[in-house]
Amino acid sequence: MSVRNGRNTFWRMNMSDVIIIGIAGGSASGKTTVASKIKEAFKDDVELISHDYYYKEHTDIPFEERVNLNYDHPNAFDTERLIKDIKDLKAGKEIERPVYSYIEHNRLAETVKVYPKKVIIVEGFLIFENHELLDLMDIKIFVDTDADERLIRRIVRDVQERGRNLESVITQYKTTVKPMHEQFVEPTKRYADIIIPYGGENEVAMSMLVNKINMILNENNEAK
C-alpha cells in the first residue's frame, strides 16, 4: 500500500535546485520544532524526511523482544536506504519512503510517496554520524538542548504520544539513550554549520536560518 504525499503529478528538478538541510541533535532536543518553523516559512517548497522512518524492519522478532532492542545505535537504522532516497530526491526523482510504528516497534507494510521539493529537510539524532549522508547536506544544523530538558520532553512525548509508561521511558534513557548520545550524537556537533540552542524557541537563530535558505533559493533562481 502506498500513501501519497505532496503533488499528485510527478515533476522533475535539476540537482542544483534542491537544498538538503540536515537537522541533528539529541533525542527530544527540538529538531522537529526547527523543521516545522522552516516548513512554516517556505510552505509547499519543503519536504521533511525523518531518520526515524528508516528504522529497520524486525517482523521476525517477537514484540516482547523488539521492545528491548537498542534503537539509539546507528545499526538500528537502514541508513543506506535513506542515503539512496536523498540522492534520488536531490536528482529530482520521487521516492517511496518507509513508515515506522513506535507502538509496534516495527516498520509497517505501507510506504509514502514523496516528491522532490526545493528544500528537503533530513531530521534525526544520528544523521551526522554517517559521513556519506553528511556529505549530501548543504546546511547542517545541530539543535543543542540541556540534557535534563531533553529527558523531560522525552518522558512527556513517549508517554502521551507513543504509548509508553514512565518506568520504560526512564529505563530506556539510562540504558541506551544517554550512553548512545554521549558516544554517537554529541561528538557530531563539530560537523554542524549552525548550532541552535533550544531549537525553534531561538527566534534570532531561526530568523538567520530562514534568511540563509532564502538567499540560496534566490541564487538558484538567478542561475537559471
Image: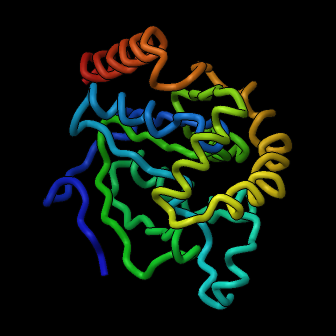
Q: Is residue 33 above or below residue 86?
A: above
Image point 34% across, 66% down: which residue?
112
Q: Can residue 96 be seen here?
A: yes
- The quadrant of the rendering that contains the C terminus is top left
- The residue nearer to you, when weighing 147 against 2, is 147
Q: Is residue 224 above or below residue 78?
A: above
The quadrant where residue 10 appears: bottom left
The quadrant where residue 17 appears: top left
Left or right: 94 in relation to 20 = left
List x then y, in percent, for residue 185.
75, 40
**Colouring scheme applied when the structure was drawn:** rainbow
Q: Is residue 143 above or below residue 166?
A: above
Image point 67% across, 90% down: which residue?
62
- The residue nearer to you, when weighing 157 against 208, is 157
List x then y, in percent, for residue 88.
43, 55
Q: Residue furthest left?
A: 8
Image point 28% across, 17% down: which residue?
218
List x then y, in percent, for residue 117.
30, 42
Left or right: 204 in relation to 223 = right
List x then y, in percent, for residue 155.
60, 49
Left or right: 26 in relation to 216 = right
Image point 31% across, 36% down: which residue?
118
